[in-house]
Image (tube, rainbow, N blue to C red):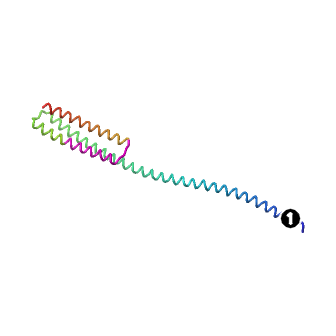
């Protein structure tokens, strides 16, 4: 029986040793899994933050596209207004250069002045709508510069008209 007890003690001892080894391996693997869990949770949080940011950016891009379409529509409206105004003013200036009578000159000058006021109101209306719908940007700056150039063109033509009227 002593031999059996010795074998049983050895078996129990070997079994305890093996359990301790497996326990150490298990604790080691559990520790690694805990670290991976922390990393995965951090990655999931970062991914969610990134997805939210991308969603906000997509909304911003959509808004920007709408604003750009609006600016393009304003540019088209402004261009059409300027083209019509330029053609009308050129006709009136040509008519004034043909040496009309003083009454005709006065009538044409009054009509030209009224037309310039209408053009100015239209241009300022388009400009104010652009300013209200857009906050900033290079395309808007360019468009506003174009508007300024158009207004300066109108101013120059009014000055030329004034000179011609003062000659008569």
Q: Residue at x 17, y 38 (%)?
A: 92
Relative to 42, 87 lies left or right: left
Relative to 88, 149 lies left or right: right
| View extreme (bottom): residue | 1
Nearer to the camera, 89 or 165: 165
- Location of residue 145 by image quarter: top left
Q: Residue at x 36, y 42 (%)?
A: 139
Q: Count neighbours of disc 1 (C-alpha within 10 A) and say few if under 14, some if 14 to 19, many if 20 or more.
A: few
Q: Which residue is disc 1 drawn over?
A: 7
From the top left corner, tell me how far across and down residue 112 is, in percent.
17, 40
24 relative to 74, above or below: below
Q: Which residues are magenta?
A: 115-137
From the top left corner, tell me how far across and down residue 85 is, in percent.
22, 41
84 relative to 54, above or below: above
Quadrant housing the C terminus: top left
Q: Residue at x 15, y 35 (%)?
A: 96
Quadrant housing the N terminus: bottom right
Q: Secondary structure at mark 1?
A: helix
88 relative to 163, above or below: below
Q: How many discs appear?
A: 1
Q: Residue at x 70, y 56 (%)?
A: 28
């Amino acid at each position: 029986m002593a031999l059996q007890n010795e074998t049983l003690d050895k078996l129990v001892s070997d079994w305890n040793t093996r359990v301790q080894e497996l326990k150490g391996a298990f604790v080691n693997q559990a520790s690694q899994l805990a670290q991976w869990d922390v990393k995965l949770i951090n990655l999931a949080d970062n991914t969610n933050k990134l997805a939210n940011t991308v969603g906000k950016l997509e909304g911003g891009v959509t808004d920007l596209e709408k604003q750009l379409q609006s600016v393009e529509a304003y540019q088209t409206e402004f261009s059409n207004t300027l083209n019509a105004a330029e053609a009308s003013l050129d006709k009136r200036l040509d008519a004034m250069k043909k040496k009309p009578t003083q009454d005709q000159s006065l009538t044409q000058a009054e009509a030209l002045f009224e037309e310039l006021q209408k053009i100015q109101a239209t241009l300022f209306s388009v400009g104010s709508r652009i300013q209200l719908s857009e906050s900033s940007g290079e395309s808007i700056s360019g468009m506003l510069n174009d508007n300024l150039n158009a207004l300066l063109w109108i101013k120059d033509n009014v000055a030329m008209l004034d000179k011609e009227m003062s000659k008569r």
